[in-house]
Structures are given as structure tokens and as C-alpha cells.
Amino acid sequence: MNIGGWQKVSLVDFPGKIATIVFTNGCVFRCSFCYNPDLVVGPFPARILEDEFFAFLEKRKGKIEGVVITGGEPTVQANLVAFMQKIKAMGFAVKLDTCGYLSDRVKEALASGAVDYVAMDIKAPLEKYSLITNIPVETDRILESIRCIINSGIPHEFRSTLVEGIHEPDDILKMAQLITGADAYYLQRFRSAEKLINASFKEKTAPSEALLKDLAAQCEKYVKKCELRAAA
Ligand code: SF4
């Protein structure tokens, strides 16, 4: 695994579990609002050695309960499944974060039995995906991952980072519709950051909390639960 970052303890990133977070290098998208450009735009030195990571896990058995694998985009790593299986075999739960674009890899990961929780980003309604991700997106792949996750029987969530002037209220309802039947949908307000993939987004803000609360209630027509959540 090409690991570019590591947060040793998190109480909020794996629902119900004390977790450690591994950030993998590389991504298929170039989202304008991405605040992890160091993990997205290469070249990527593998800054964390797998041996060091597994030694840490071994010592934290009984204290850490789960591992969140996030990025970048973890599914670009060819040995993701083997990595997750090794973590599971040590007795830890695994949460996989994904943008869902490599739908075959998402399917393979879910079928491996190594994923206990999966979170997928929904970037925009399908017609705006390329605008946000800055690549020509084959939206069938997004739909395939969505269906695969919802039908997997694995606890899951979808989440969207929302930018004022980019995501209109109607877009948010369209995104909820795309994931009809999902366990949970989280609306995250965009927060500007020093480093963003598209520097012009530094000036952008998020839709108001009041508007998003109202939209979250409307989204519950489509999903089991929809709430606002602070952006990661
Ligand atoms: S926000 Fe977009 S570009 Fe950044 S890591 Fe996630 S999917 Fe990749």
C-alpha cells in the first residue's frame, strides 16, 4: 500500500469505534474543493511503511477497534483487499472510504468480506460530476458503485461536501434521489482551506445551515436518515 498519511487515533471517523486512519496516495478525481492535494497530485513518496503501521496495530489491540482507509482514493491501490484482509485477521474492523469511481474495485472490496463499513462521496448530481471532479466522468460507474453498496448488506453511508453557488438546493435533492434506499446521507458544509486543488475555491462558502437542515428533512423521502455533519 502506498500510504501517505496516518492519524493514529480518531473518535469520530468510524461510527461507534475508536479508530486509526490511514490515508492512501493517489486519486482518480481532481475535485476543486479537495483539501488533500498532497495525496492526489503525485509524485507520492510512500511516507509510512506498512511494517510500521502493522506494528502499531499489534501494540494497540484492545484499545483501537477499527481502521479507516481513506485517501486520496484507496481503491487505486492494487493490493487494497490483501491489506484489509490482514487488518481483519488481526481482529480490527475496517471502514473503507471511496469516491466510487473504480466500481469494479469497489465490488471486489465489498465481496472480499473484509469491509465492515463503507462510506462513498457523492460529488454532485450526475450531470455536474465532471464539473466538480475535473475529469470526464463515466457516470454509469458512479451508479454501479451506489447500487453495489446499497445492496451489499454492509452498513454504509453516503456524504456530499456542499459548496454555495455550485450545489443548488435542487442538486442536493437529486443526489439524495440517486442513493434512494441508503442507510444514511450526510450533508457536509464546505470549509475553505489553505491548500485546495482549485485555488479559486478558497473564496467559496457553504450553503447556510438553515437551508441544509430544511433540505436534509426533504432528503429523508429517499434515504433512511439524512443529517448535517461538519466536513472532515
Ligand atoms: S476530494 Fe476528490 S480529489 Fe480529493 S481525495 Fe476525494 S475524490 Fe480525490
Image (cartoon, grey):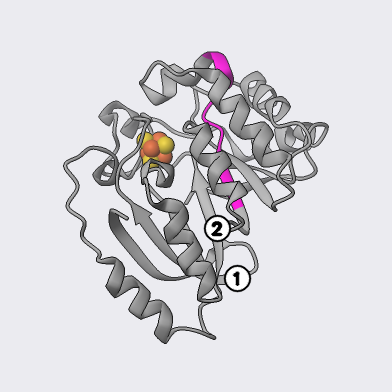
The answer to whether 184 is drawn above or below residue 129 in the figure is below
> What residue is rendered at 54% in x and 48% in y?
109
Local packing at callout 1 (Cα closer than 10 Å; few below 14, some 14-19, many 20+) is: some
> What residue is rendered at 43% in x and 63% in y?
21
Q: Secondary structure at mark 1?
A: strand
Q: Residue furthest right?
A: 221
Q: Which residue is mark 1?
A: 17
Q: Which residue is mark 2?
A: 95
Position of residue 9 measured from the top left corner of the image (x, y, whole percent) = 44, 72
Q: Is residue 100 visible?
A: no
Q: Is residue 191 visible?
A: yes
Return the residue nearer the eye: 201 or 55: 55
Q: Secondary structure at mark 2?
A: strand
Disc 2 residue type? Lys
Left/right placement of residue 89 relative to residue 78 reads right
Position of residue 145 measured from the top left corner of the image (x, y, whole percent) = 59, 33
The answer to whether 38 is drawn above or below residue 28 in the figure is below
Disc 1 residue type? Lys
Q: Are marks 2 and 1 in contact (CB under 8 Å)?
A: yes
Left/right placement of residue 179 relative to residue 196 reads right
Viewer-nearest of labels 2 and 1? 2
The answer to whether 193 is drawn above or below residue 208 in the figure is below
Q: Which residues are magenta?
A: 118-127
> What residue is rendered at 83% in x and 32% in y?
221
- Ligand 1 is located in which of the four quadrants? top left
